[in-house]
Image (spheres, rainbow, N blue to C red):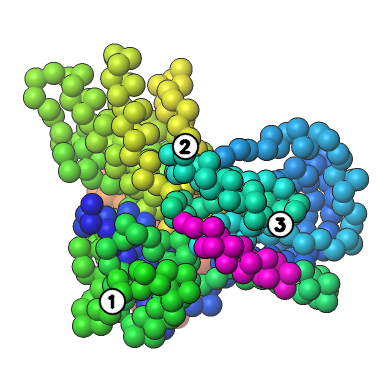
């Protein structure tokens, strides 16, 4: 497999695309001035303690207070074990742990979403290239992606020997085969960082930022530049220099793979720009002619699979199964590319045979193995839907690159022109009833006027003749289709209105 990293840096934003065999599979965007919160460590002040929810609101200096669960002990993605949070929550009441006004060190685990503030934890994690340091827990873990038991045992033995007392460490996937010396160096660097954070916490008043997560360029080297990456192309000389400086420390052997491609539009390579645009679309076409629909809500993401133009050959069950398998591969790619997390519900096309359902599930699980973000596929429900989860931390691609629609405010629907016409008619008659002036000036979207003209053509009139009014309708392209205005027309404006308005009966 050919694997490349494209780094597009300009004065306004930095974009990083991971490309496998010519197709972008991951995309990260960091816009100038935009806050990235996940990983940031703060001195926070407890604002409210909520015993009924076993949680507290923490002021970390942002617009909205952060949310801290009593048992919110967050393990890194590649830990071997998980702590049962419900058991932890039941051990002590939030009242015993926190008091209003108390200062507490917290780390952002999840970015704010919608009206919700950031989710934070008191269990700090600091990521290096080789390992993750967990200063608040005594634990040794090895990445699940290191699957050779002999190597896992070796790594666990090394880390158990070198880790500080009362601190935890997790070996990252990229560390397979590394020597003891490499871990010691990385560990010492992380220990010094944590000591510095602690010093700042003692000196700074809450709320205050103690440590900010590194830039996207830094994280590209730390988290993405592995031995399986063939080349890193960068379109900016300054970004190239910064990447090489970081690689000098973290991955010196891979530094020669970082190359300047200043002469070309970098994201035009492999049509990456076009594929990113498609990744923001609701409908995603698949090569065989089928397609999937991706709808996101605040609670979960729904994905619907359709055969589209794919008709198969002579067997319906085979056609459906083939469509579902192709869709499963595309869904795994889209989840990774869009960085969608949380609860995900997939509505595959119904299959009769249990063996075919198992085949589709296995295809989905296999495709998800390339995703470094942890996911779990639970299987089919009684309603024939597939339930799965994908770890959610930062903002998705859509959240980063898109904003809320000013028209529908996230509803994804607007009133039809006919429905707006009915509302205009009702309000006009109300205004007419309360006014001695029987001339009405109505301003609407052009589509609404067309609906009025069609109604007039089919039914003879829009407004009841007995109302006795004269209705001057003017269009405004800039109006939202659901917006309109109705007001009496002054005598001095009648001549002007006749020039740019249509009289509707």
User: Is residue 411 among the parts visible in the rendering?
Assistant: yes
**Is residue 377 placed above or below 493 in the rendered structure?**
above
**Is residue 157 placed above or below 306 in the rendered structure?**
below
Residue 247, image x, y percentages = 42, 73
Q: Residues within 10 Å of mark 3 (few under 14, many from 20)?
A: some
Residue under the image location 37 percent in, 34 percent down? 365
Q: Quadrant of the C terminus?
A: bottom left
Please indicate whether residue 127 sits to the left or right of residue 359 in the image: right
Residue 259's mark?
1
> Mark 1–mark 2 contact, CB under 8 Å?
no
Q: Main secondary structure of the magenta part?
A: helix
Secondary-structure class at tag 1: strand
Residue 442, image x, y percentages = 43, 64
Who comes first in sequence, dot 1 or dot 2?
2
Point out the frontmost of discs 1 and 2.
Answer: 2
Who comes first in sequence, dot 3 or dot 2?
2
Residue 183 on the magenta segment: yes
Q: Looking at the image, which is closer to me, 366 or 118?
A: 366
Residue 489 on the magenta segment: no
Q: Real-space Cα distance between discs 3 and 1?
A: 39 Å
Residue 174, image x, y percentages = 44, 55
Give, as a single range, the part of the protein colored magenta: 178-197
Secondary-structure class at tag 2: helix
Residue that mark 2 sits on: 149
Residue 164's mark?
3
Residue 493, image x, y percentages = 43, 78
Who comes first in sequence, dot 3 or dot 1?
3
Point out the frontmost of discs 3 and 1.
Answer: 3
Figure quadrant of residue 25: bottom left
Figure quadrant of residue 4: bottom left
User: Is residue 300 among the parts visible in the rendering?
Assistant: no
């Amino acid at each position: 497999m050919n694997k490349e990293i494209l780094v597009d840096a300009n004065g306004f934003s930095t974009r990083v695309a991971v490309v496998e065999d010519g197709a972008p599979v991951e995309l990260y965007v960091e816009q100038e001035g935009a806050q990235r919160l996940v990983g940031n460590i703060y001195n926070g002040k407890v604002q409210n303690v909520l015993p009924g929810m076993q949680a507290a609101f923490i002021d970390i200096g942002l617009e909205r207070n952060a949310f801290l669960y009593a048992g919110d002990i967050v393990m890194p993605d590649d830990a071997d074990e998980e702590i049962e949070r419900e058991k932890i929550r039941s051990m002590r009441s939030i009242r015993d742990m926190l008091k209003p006004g108390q200062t507490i060190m917290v780390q952002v685990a999840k970015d704010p979403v919608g009206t919700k503030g950031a989710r934070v934890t008191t269990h700090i994690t600091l990521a290096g290239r080789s390992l993750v340091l967990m200063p608040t827990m005594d634990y040794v873990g090895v990445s699940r992606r290191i699957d050779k038991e002999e190597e896992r045992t070796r790594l666990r033995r090394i880390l158990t020997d070198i880790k500080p007392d009362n601190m935890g460490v997790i070996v990252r996937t990229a560390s397979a085969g590394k020597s003891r010396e490499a871990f010691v160096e990385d560990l010492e660097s992380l220990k010094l960082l944590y000591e510095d954070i602690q010093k700042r916490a003692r000196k700074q008043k809450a709320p205050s930022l103690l440590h900010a997560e590194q830039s996207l360029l830094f994280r590209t080297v730390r988290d993405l530049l592995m031995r399986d990456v063939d080349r890193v192309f960068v379109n900016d000389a300054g970004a190239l220099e910064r990447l090489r400086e970081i690689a000098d420390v973290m991955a010196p052997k891979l530094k020669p793979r970082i190359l300047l491609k200043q002469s070309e539009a970098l994201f035009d390579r492999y049509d990456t720009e076009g594929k990113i645009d498609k990744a923001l679309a609701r409908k995603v076409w698949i090569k065989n002619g089928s397609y999937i629909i991706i709808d996101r809500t605040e609670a979960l993401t729904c994905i619907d699979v359709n055969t589209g133009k794919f008709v198969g050959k002579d067997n319906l069950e085979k056609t459906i199964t083939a469509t579902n398998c192709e869709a499963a591969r595309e869904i795994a790619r889209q989840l990774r590319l869009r960085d969608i997390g949380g609860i995900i519900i997939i509505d595959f096309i119904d299959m009769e045979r249990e063996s075919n359902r198992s085949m589709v599930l296995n295809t989905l699980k296999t495709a998800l193995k390339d995703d470094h973000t942890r996911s779990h596929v639970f299987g089919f429900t009684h309603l024939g839907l597939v339930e799965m989860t994908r770890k959610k931390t930062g903002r998705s691609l859509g959240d980063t690159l898109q904003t809320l629609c000013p028209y529908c405010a996230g509803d994804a629907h607007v009133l039809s022109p006919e429905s707006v016409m009915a509302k205009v008619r009702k309000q006009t008659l109300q205004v007419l009833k309360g006014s001695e002036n029987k001339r009405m000036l109505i301003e609407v979207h052009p589509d609404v006027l067309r609906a009025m003209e069609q109604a007039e053509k089919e039914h003879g009139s829009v407004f009841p003749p007995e109302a006795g009014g004269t209705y001057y309708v003017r269009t405004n392209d800039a109006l939202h289709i659901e917006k309109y205005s109705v007001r009496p027309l002054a005598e001095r404006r009648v001549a002007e209105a006749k020039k740019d308005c249509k009289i509707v009966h």
